Image (cartoon, grey):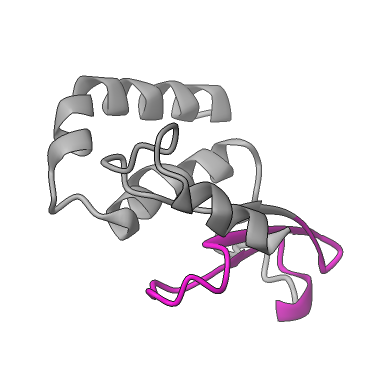
Amino acid sequence: MNNKERLSRLIAQYQKNMEFYRNAREFNEQDCRDEFISPLLESFGWDVHNEKGTSPQYKEVVVEKFSNSGDRPDYTLTLNGVSKIFVEAKKPAVNIKEEQEPAIQARRYG
């Protein structure tokens, strides 16, 4: 399956089950990361799981393990070991258009 097909599959999966994802308490941030965000980044060509075996300090994607500390981004996308893009994951039940905390949290990383 090519990257465009993977992306289309992710979109279709989310659309098909959107009400569940938005309303289910048991579909948490880690579930969202596993089912959607990591595969999305992979479909854009990012080596999320370091399958290339890159040295740790030069990994393309640094994935923060699940924590409630809020002091590190969920994903840091890098170029030659230099942080370039931060990705903050939220479960679909979080309305990022209305809630301020997700934006404040993401801004802290920049």
Q: Is residue 93 above or below residue 7?
A: below
Q: Magenta includes 24?
A: no
* Residue at 58% from the left image edge and 60% from the top image edge: 75
* Residue at 73% from the left image edge and 71% from the top image edge: 54
Give the residues in magenta: 56-84
* Residue at 26% from the left image edge and 41% from the top image edge: 93
Q: Quadrant of the C terminus?
A: bottom right
Q: Is 8 left or right of 74, judged from the image as shown?
A: left
Residue 2: image quadrant is: top right
Q: Is 48 left or right of 28, judged from the image as shown?
A: right
Q: Magenta includes 59?
A: yes
So how many labels did they put on this image? Answer: 0
Front position in the image: 4 or 24: 24
Residue 34 on image: x %, y %: 36, 53
Residue 55: image quadrant is: bottom right
Residue 28 on image: x %, y %: 25, 55
Q: Is residue 94 above or below residue 70?
A: above
Q: Is 63 left or right of 11, judged from the image as shown?
A: right
Residue 12 on image: x %, y %: 32, 20
Q: Is residue 29 above or below residue 63?
A: above
* Residue at 43% from the left image edge and 38% from the top image edge: 96
Residue 37 on image: x %, y %: 46, 45
Front position in the image: 16 or 68: 68
Residue 84: image quadrant is: bottom right
Q: Is 24 left or right of 12, judged from the image as shown?
A: left
Q: Is residue 73 above or below residue 20?
A: below
Front position in the image: 92 or 14: 92
